[in-house]
């Protein structure tokens, strides 16, 4: 209970904005949850699968999946003007006319450098 009320909200604060890109950074954040699962279930065994089973029994989703959900929620709020963020500043509408695209389709930004990844 302490993890869900103190630690996880601290980790997830503004996570839709600062979501890490490198796997080593994602692993560092996930390891905090894994340590908390060991503590919550009082299972400190080093046998493979112990922490995974503890996370399943606690019904804790991965922090990465929670960050993805948070990003999608922010995207939805931007598109439908539920937050004070101008979507035209960050999103480019998909201009190609086709029966497979609708007025809410956006272009995915591409670049040759890591500018948009961080």
Image (cartoon, rainbow, N blue to C red):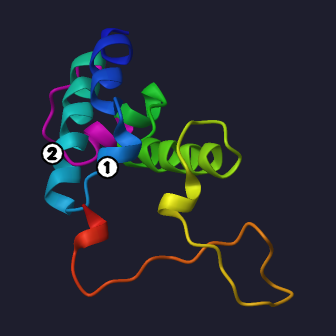
Disc 1: CA contacts within 10 A as few (<14), some (14-19) or many (>=20): some
Q: State the residue in front, 8 or 61.
A: 8
Q: Is residue 44 magenta?
A: yes
Asked which quadrant contains residue 56, the reply is top left
Q: Seen from this angle, which residue lies furthest right?
A: 99
Report the residue at 24% width, 71% height from top. 115
Which of the two discs, 2 and 1, labels the residue nearer the N terminus? 1
Report the residue at 27% width, 19% height from top. 7
* Prevalent SS, magenta region: loop
Q: Which mark is residue 28?
A: 2
Secondary structure of residue under mark 2: helix
Q: State the residue in front, 13 or 63.
A: 13
Q: Position of residue 41 (x, y in %)?
A: 30, 19
Q: Magenta residues, as a range? A: 41-53
Tell whether label 1 touches label 2 (CB within 8 Å).
Answer: no
Q: State the residue in front, 56 or 75.
A: 75
102 sits left or right of 71 in the view: right
Q: Position of residue 113 (x, y in %)?
A: 21, 81
- Dot 1 corresponds to which residue? 19
Report the residue at 44% width, 32% height from top. 60
Asked which quadrant contains residue 87, the reply is bottom right
Q: Is residue 118 magenta?
A: no
Q: CA distance from mark 2 to mark 1?
A: 12 Å
Report the residue at 33% width, 42% height from top. 52
Asked which quadrant contains residue 14, the reply is top left
Judge whether 7 appears above or below 95 on screen.
above
């Amino acid at each position: 209970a302490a993890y869900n009320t103190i630690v996880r909200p601290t980790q997830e604060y503004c996570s839709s904005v600062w979501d890490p890109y490198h796997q080593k950074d994602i692993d560092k954040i996930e390891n905090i949850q894994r340590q908390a699962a060991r503590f919550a279930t009082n299972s400190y065994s080093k046998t493979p699968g112990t922490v995974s089973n503890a996370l399943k029994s606690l019904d804790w989703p991965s922090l990465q999946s929670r960050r993805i959900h948070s990003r999608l929620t922010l995207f939805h709020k931007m598109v439908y003007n539920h937050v004070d963020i101008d979507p035209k500043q960050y999103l480019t509408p998909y201009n190609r006319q086709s029966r497979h695209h609708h007025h809410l389709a956006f272009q995915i930004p591409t670049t040759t450098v890591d500018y948009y990844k961080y």
